[in-house]
Image: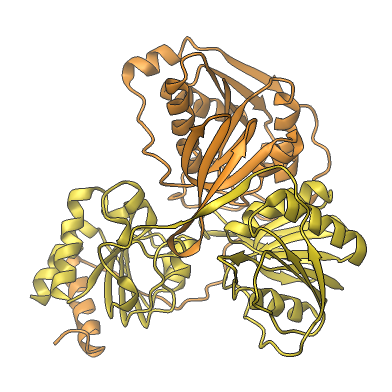
Chain colours: A yellow, B orange
Amino acid sequence: MKAMLIGEVVGAKLNPSFAELLGFAGRLGAEVVGLVMGDTSDRPSFAGKLVLAAGPEYAPQAHKAMVQELVAAEKPDLVVLVHSAYGWDLAPRLAVALSAPQISEVKEVTDGVYQVGVCNGKLVRQLAPNPGLTILTLQAGAFAPAQESGSPTVENKTLPSLPGPGLVGYKSKPKTGVDLSKAERIVSVGRGIGKKENIELARKLAAVLKAELGSSRPVVDAGWIDPSHQVGSTGTTVAPKLYLACGISGAVQHLAGMKKSELIIAVNKDKEAPIGEVARYFVVADLMEFLPALTEALQ
Amino acid sequence: MKILVCIKQVADLESRFVVPAGATWFDEADLSFRINEYDEYAIEEAVRLKESLPESELVVLTLGPPRAAEALKKALAMGADRAIHLNDPKAQDRDSFSVAQAIAGAVKDQGFDLIFTGMQSQDRGSGQVGLLLSELLGINGVSCVVGFAKTEGGIQVERELDGGLRAEVALGLPALVTCQLGLNQPRYPTLPNIMKAKKKPLETIELGPQTAPRVKAQGLSLPPKRGAAEFIEGDNATKVAKLVAILKEKKLVG
């Protein structure tokens, strides 16, 4: 078994999630060929071979061509990326170029059968690819990062220059509003809050609990709250002492940003909401009734 | 400009899903269906572009069973000019590649300049079909888009990366864009537009038998209960009292 692990470079830095790819390969006992494309001086440590391809860090046609070249030379059984914006963007291109089956956001594997969450994590699908090379993207955080050791043999290459989508630059979301990353307590609202005006109910509870106000993505997208309040992999990652999730169903991207909180309490009408996977307590309640009553009791 | 938007109809995710023994997909009886949320952003962006370019045509396409025609009607009411339904009563048995291949076959000779899709479906969530389609068509493609602008001779988009960072990417036409939530504010169809949509053309194309998928579905199950969430139920006062007691015990309130 041989696995080609493709790292992600953003802003000349290698994403530390490369260690999760190594952890996955370790679980399978696979021989590792690492591939890092882009200009970075970061070097992962592991036992195996590392190919460093200099050039732009986002240039999908060039990256695809480099993977094709390397797959022809190395003949791996698996090509593995993290299911981030980078893996998401590159993997389907590889599936077409290499005529290979692709399985997205894998969270577990047993005897060549891959498990992926569907319907917002309410169900799990078991998928088996056709024999031969398979392209995988791994759910962020699903596989324990490897304790890296050893130094790979390094081969240097240069990415070809090909027409196609090209990186113009980066920009950050404007840093205004709250900084949730240091909050000790967070009362967070999800789509279940119903409408913008109802957020006041959570704001009052947060004030009584001396907590900051957080939110899930749909609340931001609906324009009900400033984006600085968004918790999750594309917002702020938090780990407060108390995370009170009000009307948040628990999309994977949200869970990734808050599951390390010390105490998670969910308030939701839907007992089967995936937030129950990470919550310690789950209050089955209507927010309109429960939040004002809780606020009053705590005053 | 010729614009295509590809959408999918999915089950309401608030549903209680029932998986019959040995089945690889859930039972659709008694469920309600709607347009995949990501695709609503794709439709909205396509409609805005069409409105800014008067000489353009906007086509909406779906691959799905007969029920999926409803999703097309809503897209027509949002502003698409005509609709194509790739009808397959067994659409759920297809893998992403098979879906992309069927769509590519139907649109490859139609000369679309821009194609919009959602970045993933809410049900399967594989995030593959859009870019598989652009690769099969041999055109530029870009995913996870939260900002879109037409430029001289092409487009410039913003891709959403982790931790609030965005990458600005430029590409030439023809191109395919997969849309992330928050790209815009999808409109609600107005009643006059719903009435007008009934007169817009909706073409149904029956898809032939499926070829073997690259990825075989072996099963579908409920997730293992990892968490040990303790449920707090009862009348409102009881629930409040229980939660207050917990917060006191954890010294989170005085």
Provide residue B63's location: percent of width, then percent of height: 64, 32
Q: Nearer the viewer, residue A14 or B245?
A: A14
Q: Quadrant of the N terminus of chain A?
A: bottom right
User: Which residue is at a point 65% across and 71% down the rendered structure image?
Assistant: A40
Where B81 falls versus B213 (above or below)?
Answer: above
Provide residue A137's location: percent of width, then percent of height: 67, 62
Q: Is residue A228 visible?
A: yes
Q: Nearer the viewer, residue A33 or B81?
A: A33
Where B228 falls versus B88 (above or below)?
Answer: below
Q: Quadrant of the C terminus of chain A?
A: bottom left
Provide residue B47's location: percent of width, then percent of height: 45, 26
User: Which residue is at a point 74% across and 33% down the rendered structure image?
Assistant: B137
Q: Quadrant of residue A165?
A: top right
Q: Nearer the viewer, residue A166 or B67?
A: A166
Please state if A121 lies on the left or on the right of A94 as rendered: left
Where B63 falls versus A71 (above or below)?
Answer: above
Provide residue A136's location: percent of width, then percent of height: 72, 61
Please state if B251 lies on the left or on the right of A52 as rendered: left
Please state if A123 lies on the left or on the right of A128 as rendered: left
Q: Quadrant of residue A144?
A: bottom right
